[in-house]
Amino acid sequence: MATVVVAVLALAAGCASSSDLLQRFESLMDGVGGVVEIETAGSDSPLGVAEAQATVVVEDDLSDDDLEAVAARIRPFVARNVGDSSGWRFVDVRRGTVSFEVLADEGDTAAQLDLARRVADDAVFAEVSLATHAFGEDGATGDDSPRRGFGITVVPSESSDVLSAWQRARSLRDAAAQLTDVDVTAWSPDTRRFVTENVSGFPSVLDDPATSDVVLDAADQARLLDAVGAADLGAGRVEVLPEGIRVDLDTPSVTGHHSRDEVAEASPRAARIAGVLVGMSEVPGTSIGFVSSPDERRELDGDLSAAESLVDVVAPDTVTYSAISARSVEVWTSGLEGVVPAMQAIGGSAAVSGMDEIRVSSGAADRRGLSFSGRPEALAVLATVTGAIVAAPRIEGVAVTATEGHLSIELDDDDHDAAATDAAVADVVGAVRTAPAGTVVTFRRDVRGAADLATETVGQAATGECSTLADDDAALCAIVRSAWGV
């Protein structure tokens, strides 16, 4: 049975059309032994950029000598064209389940051929791609692969596993001097496990907050990947990079939403996985990644039991999302009416004293754009001010941050006419003045986050000086000063 090789060729603006480009490639391959067929596709943009793709089908049982002859035919073409002003990007050759890139340098191409020969009959691999370009484009690693990078990508065979395939591929890579600066990636669509290096400097796909200075070596990566049990992972996915681990139990659904039963079922699995992984961190308080499940996110930066207990004290039928770490909690409620009760419930728990920050909002359900956060010792004051803001329907686009004796008010004045802004800011001022006397209140614009508009003290007359500010900031400062009262 014949298999497919993808050769993707791009032509820069002002040059030939994609059909011309394809004809050149077909002419190059005309009469080459072992080629079964060449499938082509191309496109031409209005800007004059032509892109073409040639799929070269070669025999599965093509001999090593004939495979080398195919590469030898292509290599001078690559040396003349790839990377020059014509815009040609790369040419891959595929035999059976193994594909490799033909490189400009003869020694580099020989190294690719050598690897292709060695992995072809290796029982550890079901599929191998050897490349220095951004492989994964046009399906080279399969549409399910969670990352597209540089180097060697392997899919384990039925008799192997991701770790075995990854370790075997790394040893093969290390034996080829020309390939020591490329990544090795292993991905199993069946078990939904993914592990990769990052020696090429390809951008990490590991999202914040797992962006600490921790860099895991291959042994640590293997330990983390192996620690996630198949039963708890279920239909989820685990990805391990040198920067850390990401476990996602939030599997796609037809509607884009999950039932309450699905959320409840995934939560204890996520908690168990997080507990195991946190226990493996050798640097207490340092994030090694995160675990996500429907409507939950756990950052792996230490003991999460206190943060989990704080989410549990909020009425469960009002929580639509929670994000926790060892020292912070974020809760979204089903509506603004649930924000203050959630804040009060969390503030009444003894576990809150160990937190650095509590964030409460109604998330996507809030069209007014309100958010609230505070230190544990300031939650009582924050709840009072939050209640006043929620009760004032004209207030929109406000973020409130509370620390002991201080409130920071971030105002969004975009898309409001002057009268609406005057009224809304007046309501904000009225709300924050429900805080205890002596509380210092700082007003800022969200588009100028570092610049204070005004700083006032509850129980005292306005003291803000607006004349030194830029025109738009001065206008907003004047509104705050007028509403506060002199």
Image (spheres, rainbow, N blue to C red):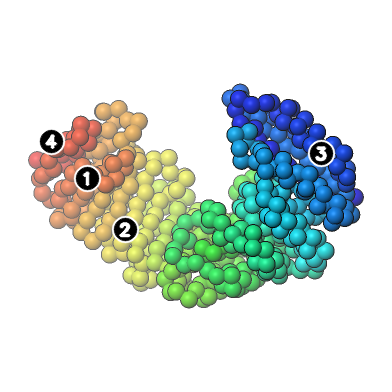
Residue 256 vs residue 75: left or right? left
Residue 354 percent coordinates (x, y): 35, 70
Q: Residues within 10 Å of mark 2 (few under 14, many from 20)?
A: many
Q: Mark 3 points at which residue?
A: 29
Which label sits on residue 467?
4
Q: Which residue is drawn at 33% across and 47% down?
A: 399
Q: What is the three-letter code of the residue carrying label 3?
A: Met
Q: Which of marks 3 and 4 is in front?
A: 3
Label 3 to label 4, Cα distance in Å? 75 Å
Label 1 to label 4, Cα distance in Å? 13 Å
First in sequence, mark 1 or 4: give its number: 1
Q: Are marks 1 and 4 in contact (CB under 8 Å)?
A: no
Q: Quadrant of residue 225?
A: bottom right
Residue 365 percent coordinates (x, y): 47, 45
Label 1 to label 3, Cα distance in Å? 67 Å
Front position in the image: 430 or 418:
418
Label 2 to label 3, Cα distance in Å? 67 Å
Q: What is the three-letter code of the residue carrying label 1?
A: Asp
The secondary element bearing badge 3 is classed as helix
The secondary element bearing badge 2 is classed as strand
Q: Mark 2 points at which residue?
A: 374
Label 4 to label 2, Cα distance in Å? 31 Å
Q: Which residue in the rendered view is the most extreme toward the top?
A: 46
Residue 425 percent coordinates (x, y): 25, 38
Q: Mark 1 points at which residue?
A: 452
First in sequence, mark 1 or 2: give its number: 2
